[in-house]
C-alpha cells in the first residue's frame, strides 16, 4: 500500500488496480468508502478499457469476438510504480499477453495522484502503443462516505453542481444506456439525496466538457467533498439500491455502457474514444475534502 501525506490529508493507494483506498483529514475523518462487502467491496476502481457493461459482455473488432466483463480489467490488475515521493505517486499498466486476449490493442495507462493542501489531483493518461487507432473508454468510480459524520444521516446530504444549470440526463435501462431517451434535469438548485433516487441504477448526467464542480455537502455541518472535473463528457452518481448503502459514488466518465440498441461493434460503440498512433489522452479531476 502506498502512502501520501501532507499537513491536511493522508492518502492510501493500492497497487492492485491503482485504486484509491483512503483519504483522511488531520482529525482522522475518512472520506472514502471502506469497501464493506455487504454493500460494495470496492473503494474507487478505475474503469478501463470500458465503462459500464457491454451487451452480453462481448464486442466485435476486426471480425473477431472478444469478451470483457463490466468496467474492464484495469481495476483487477497490478500496476507498477513509476515514481513515488511523499506527496505524489505515478503508477503504470501496460498491455500484455493476457490483456491482448480480451482487448487487442497495445497501450500504456498512467495514473497519477498528487496531494496539494486539501486537494488530491487525479490524472489518467492513455498512450497508444499500437499501429492502429486505440479504441477505449475510461472512468473513475470513487465512493464517498455518506454520512461523513456521526451527527448526520444520508438524507441530510445533497449534491450540488456548478455551474448551476439545466443539464442533460441519459437514462439507463439497466445495465445499458438509452441516449435516445435523453431528458433535461434542472440542477439550478442542490439535488437532495435519498436512497430511492437510485432505483434504476446510476444517474447519468451529460457535462459540457469543460470544468464542472460537484459538491457532496450536508445541512448540519461544513464537512463534504468537492469533485472538480476538467473535461469529462459524463458523470455517474450511484449508490446501490435497494440496499441502504452509506456511501455515494461521483464518477467522471470518458465513455458509457453499451446502448440498448448496440450492434456490438467496438468501432460503432456510443461515446468511444479513438486515439491515433503514438498519441496520448489525458483525463483529470480533483477531490477536495473539507
Image (tube, grey):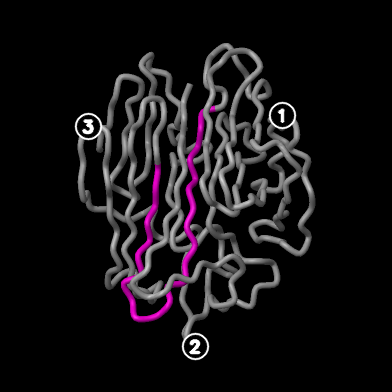
In the rendered image, which quarter is residue 132 located in?
A: bottom left
Q: Could you say which disc has been placed on residue 63 in the image?
A: 2
Q: Quadrant of the N terminus?
A: top left
Which image quadrant for residue 94? Answer: bottom left
- Quote the CA–CA distance across marks 1 and 3: 37 Å
Residue closer to the observer: 129 or 156: 129
78, above or below 161, in the image: below
Of mark 1 and mark 3, the one earlier in the sequence is 3
Residue 41 x/y as whole percent: 45, 41
Q: Which residue is rendered at x = 58% and y = 13% of the image? A: 221
Question: Which callout, 1 or 2, points to the residue nearer the camera?
Answer: 1
Q: Which residue is mark 1?
A: 192
Q: Is residue 138 magenta?
A: yes
> What span is colored magenta in the figure?
122-145
Callout 1: SS:
strand
In what element is the residue under mark 2?
Answer: loop
- Tell me what residue is drawn at x 74 percent, y 31 percent: 189
151, above or below 148, in the image: above
Residue identified by numbered label 3 = 86
Q: Judge left or right: residue 257 versus residue 284.
A: right
Residue found at x 77% / y 44%: 185
271 left or right of 49? right
Q: Is residue 124 magenta?
A: yes
The image shows residue 159, relative to residue 58, as above or below, that is above
Amino acid at each position: 500500500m502506498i502512502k501520501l501525506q501532507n499537513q491536511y490529508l493522508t492518502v492510501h493507494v493500492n497497487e492492485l488496480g491503482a485504486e484509491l483506498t483512503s483519504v483522511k483529514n488531520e482529525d482522522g475523518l475518512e472520506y472514502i468508502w471502506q469497501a464493506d462487502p455487504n454493500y460494495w467491496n470496492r473503494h474507487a476502481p478505475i474503469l478501463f478499457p470500458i465503462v459500464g457493461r457491454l451487451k452480453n459482455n462481448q464486442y466485435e473488432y476486426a471480425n473477431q469476438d472478444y469478451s470483457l466483463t463490466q468496467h474492464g480489467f484495469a481495476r483487477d490488475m497490478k500496476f507498477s510504480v513509476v515514481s513515488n515521493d511523499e506527496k505524489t505517486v505515478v503508477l503504470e499498466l501496460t498491455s500484455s499477453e493476457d490483456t491482448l486476449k480480451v482487448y487487442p490493442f497495445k497501450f500504456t495507462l498512467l495514473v497519477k495522484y498528487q496531494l496539494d493542501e486539501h486537494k488530491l489531483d487525479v490524472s489518467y493518461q492513455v498512450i497508444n502503443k499500437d499501429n492502429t487507432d486505440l479504441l477505449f473508454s475510461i472512468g473513475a468510480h470513487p465512493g464517498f462516505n455518506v454520512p461523513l459524520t456521526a451527527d448526520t444521516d444520508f438524507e441530510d446530504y445533497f449534491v450540488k453542481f456548478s455551474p448551476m444549470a439545466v443539464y442533460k440526463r441519459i437514462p439507463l435501462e439497466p445495465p445499458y444506456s438509452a441516449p435516445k431517451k435523453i431528458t433535461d434535469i434542472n440542477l439550478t438548485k442542490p439535488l437532495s439525496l435519498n436512497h430511492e433516487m437510485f432505483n434504476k441504477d446510476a444517474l447519468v448526467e451529460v457535462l459540457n466538457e469543460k470544468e464542472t464542480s460537484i459538491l457532496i455537502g450536508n445541512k448540519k455541518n461544513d464537512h463534504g467533498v468537492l469533485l472538480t472535473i476538467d473535461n469529462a463528457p459524463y458523470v455517474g452518481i450511484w449508490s446501490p439500491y435497494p440496499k441502504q448503502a452509506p456511501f455515494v459514488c461521483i464518477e467522471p466518465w470518458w465513455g458509457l455502457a453499451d446502448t440498448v440498441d448496440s450492434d456490438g461493434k467496438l468501432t460503432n460503440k456510443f461515446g468511444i474514444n479513438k486515439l491515433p498512433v503514438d498519441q496520448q489522452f489525458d483525463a483529470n479531476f480533483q477531490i477536495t475534502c473539507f
